[in-house]
Image (tube, rainbow, N blue to C red):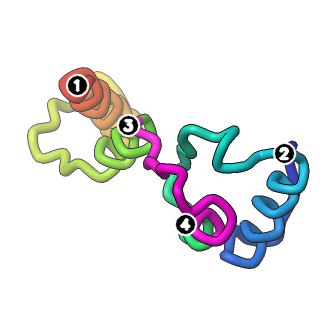
Amino acid sequence: MWKIALQEDAEAWNTFIGALYTKGMTEETTQLVVSDGTKGLPNALERHLPCVPHQRCLLHKIKNIADHCGYTDWVLDPTLPPAEAVRQATQTRKQAVLKSLC
């Protein structure tokens, strides 16, 4: 099931989880909820599925870490235009960070 919402607030999540609940998603049928860290979801889960564990998606956590790493040890390719050299160095560093986390 999917739904388009104007925002991912507690009200929108309550409506969505409530609809899933009426379609049969209960504490007995659900072992775990994994999400990307949206703010409104935990309240809706507490209301509708209070005993079901909720976990932050590890891929999203790793991606967020990589996105916010400092890039102080860049090696810029002098043969590329500056903006492209920075983009390439950033991508190389990000891949190294992701590789070390996995």
Q: Quadrant of residue 30?
A: top right
Which numbered disc, 4 or 2, marks the residue closer to the eye? Answer: 2
Residue that label 4 marks? 42
Q: Nearer the viewer, residue 20 or 101?
A: 20
Residue that label 3 marks? 87
Earlier-in-chain disc, 4 versus 3: 4
Boundaries of the magenta span: 44-58
Q: Residue at point 30% right, 25% down?
A: 95
Q: CA distance from mark 3 to mark 1?
A: 14 Å
Q: Where residue 55 sits in the image (x, y, percent)?
A: 44, 47
Q: CA distance from mark 2 to mark 1?
A: 43 Å
Mark number displayed over residue 96? 1
68 is within the stretch colored magenta: no
Dot 2: what SS?
Answer: loop
Which numbered disc, 2 or 1, marks the residue closer to the eye? Answer: 2
Task: Identify which amino acid the numbered label 4 is placed on.
Answer: Pro
Task: Identify which amino acid the numbered label 1 is placed on.
Answer: Ala
